[in-house]
Amino acid sequence: MSKKTVVITGASSGIGYALAQAYLRRGDNVVGNARTMERLRQAAAGLGRPSGFLPVAGDIASAATAREIVRQAVDTFGRIDVLVNNAGIFIPKPIAEYTDDDLDRIIDTNLKGFFHITQQAVAHMASQGDGHIVNITASIAMQPTVRVPALLPVLIKGGLNHATQALAIELAGKNIRVNAVAPGIIETPLHAPETFGFLKSLNPAGHIGKVEDIVGAVTYLTDSAFTTGAILPVDGGAAAGHW
């Protein structure tokens, strides 16, 4: 398999870090974005193969950051084969408790952080006649639950699920595949260990997923030449319905 260049947003920790590590181990090049260079340097120290990892710091909500990521990726590695839109925040609250700041943060990271980099990457992928985009969305946007009120994440991540299908149709003729992985509860630093008992009850499998589960789903999709428009829940069955 030929070496790919993979752009990953939110690459300094959690799922993004695990994805960067996995693609580097496969021999691919990785362009990793996070808000600060300090966080990216800390991540790079643990990733190995530093020559294959290009850190590009900046706010992913900014169109200028998106342009810079694509420019540096192409200047350094010659092309972009895969974009993983991983950067995102999750703010669960009853609707009455959301603040204007919550709304702005969700829109900036989860919506603008998807749109600007995807727009830039698509322009490049279309020019080379090939590419793959994977959006990390959320299982709760497919099957909301009263046990975790989360209107704003459901609003944006649910929209990204539909955007995935819309882009898959729009870009199929350009040989660009667009898919989504919708994680359920995954064991990352986002969740405190004392919450694990409750979190395990949020899916019928009765346990929490690992970052490796998401890595496996993403790499399956980016290895596929004939899968596009798919939204793949990785959530212990939570999106299948009530139980």
Image (cartoon, rainbow, N blue to C red):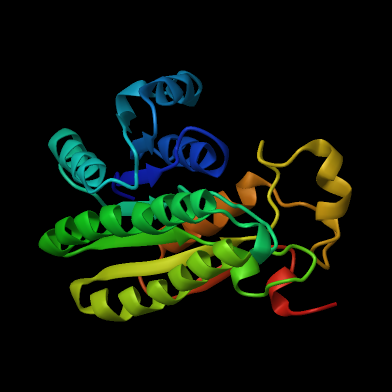
x and y percent of residue 14 in the render?
57, 39
The answer to whether residue 83 is left or right of residue 46 is left
- Of 213 and 159, nearer the camera is 159
User: x and y percent of residue 117 in the render?
Assistant: 28, 52
From the viewer's perspective, is 116 left or right of 128? right
- Which quadrant holds residue 238? bottom right
Taking 176 as reference, is 226 left or right? right
What residue lies at 45% left-to-right and 24% top-to-bottom?
39
Q: Is residue 113 above or below residue 164?
A: above
Does any portion of residue 234 appear in the rendered image? no
Left or right, 64 with reference to 210: left
Quarter occupied by the C terminus: bottom right
x%, y% of residue 169?
A: 31, 81
Number of callouts: 0
Placement of 188 over or under 162, stated as above or below: above
Identified at 68% across, 50% down, the residue is 186
Residue 215's place in the image compared with 229, above or below, is: above
Q: Residue furthest right?
A: 197
What residue is shown at x 39% (from left), y 44% (from top)?
A: 8
Q: Is residue 151 visible to the viewer in this orientation of the structure? A: yes
Give the quarter of the image for residue 205: bottom right
Please report the residue visible at 51 percent of the width from the left and 65 percent of the height from the top.
157
Q: Position of residue 81 (x, y in %)?
A: 27, 53
